[in-house]
Image (cartoon, rainbow, N blue to C red):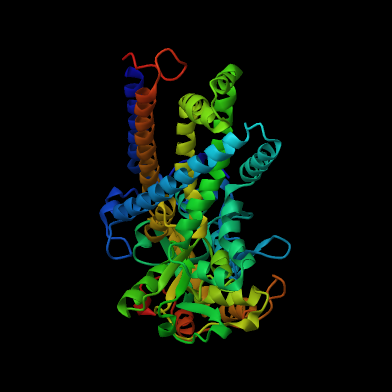
Amino acid sequence: MDPRFRGEFVSYRWNWGILWDLSPDGQLTYFGTLLAGLKWTMLTAIGAWAIALVMGSLVGVARTLPNRWAQRAASAYVELFRNTPLLMQLFLWYFILPELLPHDWGTWMKSLRNAPLYTAIIGLGLYSSARVAEQVRAGISSLSHGQGLAGQALGFTTGQVYRYVLLPMAYRIILPPLTSEFLNTIKNTSVALTIGLLELTARARAMQEFSFQIFEAFTVATLLYLVLNLVVVACMRRLERAVALPGYITAQPAKA
Amino acid sequence: MHRRLLAASVTLGLLASLLAAGPACAQAALDGTLKKIKDSGAITLGYRESSVPFSFLDDSQKPVGYALEICMKVVDAVKRELKLDKLTVNMAPVTSATRIPLIANGTVDLECGSTTNNAERQKQVAFTNTHFLTASRMVAKKASKIVKIDDLKGKNVVSTSGTTNIKQLNDVNVQRNLGVNILPAKDHAEAFLMVETDRAAAFVMDDILLAGLVAASKTPDAYVIPDDAFSTPEPYAIMLRRDDAAFKAVVDKATADFYRSPEGARLYDKWFMQPIPLHGLTLHVPMSPALKKAFANPSDSGDPASY
């Protein structure tokens, strides 16, 4: 290829007006379909994040428990979910699992409406939970050993030590990486287009396929992701400040 | 606070330059593809990796196919037109997501595949004469006893996301009040997998692509493609850059001459009736009356009603 012709858009026709044209579904404009996609993205991300937090906390705590077997089971869970590609996991949940179940259950699963949404929420939730678990474990490990012992000295049970001593500090410490993890979860929802979820990236692809206005479609989709994530970042900053303890190594009140 | 403002203004600035670059660069289109081919001594054909039998990788991973052979006829014509002794033919793989940018930025000169020609797309690219006509049909398992569109009532039906087919399925679903649950799949292979695993009762797609998927499946006899169609036949054509009248004239004449000659029908027979170099498949799709007409009177119209 002659370098003179590379990288230079010799014939792309920009048409931002396309966003306000009616999309082929006959009801929404193209921009409307992207917003509808954003709604599915948010729904998937929030559902997956809820699972990730609950499962991640349980597994993360289990990795720090004195019980060997709990530690091993939790380690196996983490290594399984974080060391296989998310795409493979979604495919396994969506295509393979129903074939392994008893026939009637499989058929029921396959005929579910919104099956891609449920699959995406559960699949992405479990994948992210492994990563959250590692952060919870790191948060707990970062606390001085004496804190747990002090709790025990006061007569707390193991559960009470975690509930009242370790976890309140650990969560404060890991809030910044948890924010990143939530942002990752939001961006990872785009993988769900491979199992037919009509989220934001899928809508952008559909828009370019119908209209051939590929750059407009993906520019707007990129901006929507960016705005959504900036909103999340802003909210998490506020949360960090709200729960910050003076004198501890968590977020300080902003100086500006 | 200042840092945040700075970051925001940098982002906006980048965006603004991106937008401004659009119309400015469009001016360069006047260069013309013929000049580009003459200067560089090369032409680049875009091929699809799995659009059987139009453009695909054969058993030895070489791009081949019906549309690619038509493109080679065009290459010969361009070579004659420019009086070149030697013209290098480069091959570039394209997907439905990359074909527009690659055509637009000059990487690919002709897209040789199974791209539908329609009015909306003509606002962005140009198409030469139609080389195939396809209608939206469905494939279902014979065991499911689906023989017409109304049999889909209340069932899960899959189609590939972002295709005109899923739109037609949607339209028919609304018009006939079928209550079909439409599942979008990422690509054709995955959509077919959904029918294979009973995730969906049927897969709606261009009939020729369905014929290819059935022929390549483990049990071709288990599937049926009912005649009932979701659309009138739509034209497939080779895609090129818009607003390049000189190049389009050469391409149009080359394809029209080829379709009218006996060679056109022979090439069709080779790819649609004979075994093709992909696991020895044979598609068994005879030339439709509409396509016979379109070969006798070549047309680059994107309007299905004109065929």
A86 to B235, vertically: above or below: above
| Figure disc tally | 0
Please indicate whether residue A245 sits to the left or right of residue B92 in the image.
Answer: left
Query: In the rendering, at what x and y percent does residue A56 appear?
Result: 54, 39
Query: In the rendering, at what x and y percent does residue A197 appear?
Result: 45, 57
Instruction: Choose between A85 and A153: the one closer to the eye.
Output: A153
Residue A141 appears in view: yes
Residue at image x 53%, y 20%? A154
Query: In the rendering, at what x and y percent does residue B174 appear?
Result: 32, 74
Rendering quarter of residue B169: bottom left
Please indicate whether residue B277 sits to the left or right of residue B293 in the image.
Answer: right
Residue B81 appears in view: no
Please indicate whether residue B4 sits to the left or right of residue A107 in the image.
Answer: left
Instruction: Choose between B263 and A180: the one closer to the eye.
Output: A180
Residue at image x 64%, y 40%? A74
Query: In the rendering, at what x and y percent does residue A230 appear?
Result: 37, 34
A237 to B289, vertically: above or below: above
Instruction: Choose between B130 and B149: the one closer to the eye.
Output: B149
B201 to A138, vertically: above or below: below
B141 to A183, vertically: above or below: below
Instruction: Choose between A124 and B230: the one closer to the eye.
Output: A124
Residue at image x 61%, y 70%? A102
Quadrant containing the C terminus of chain B is bottom left
Quadrant containing the N terminus of chain B is top left
Residue at image x 53%, y 43%? A55
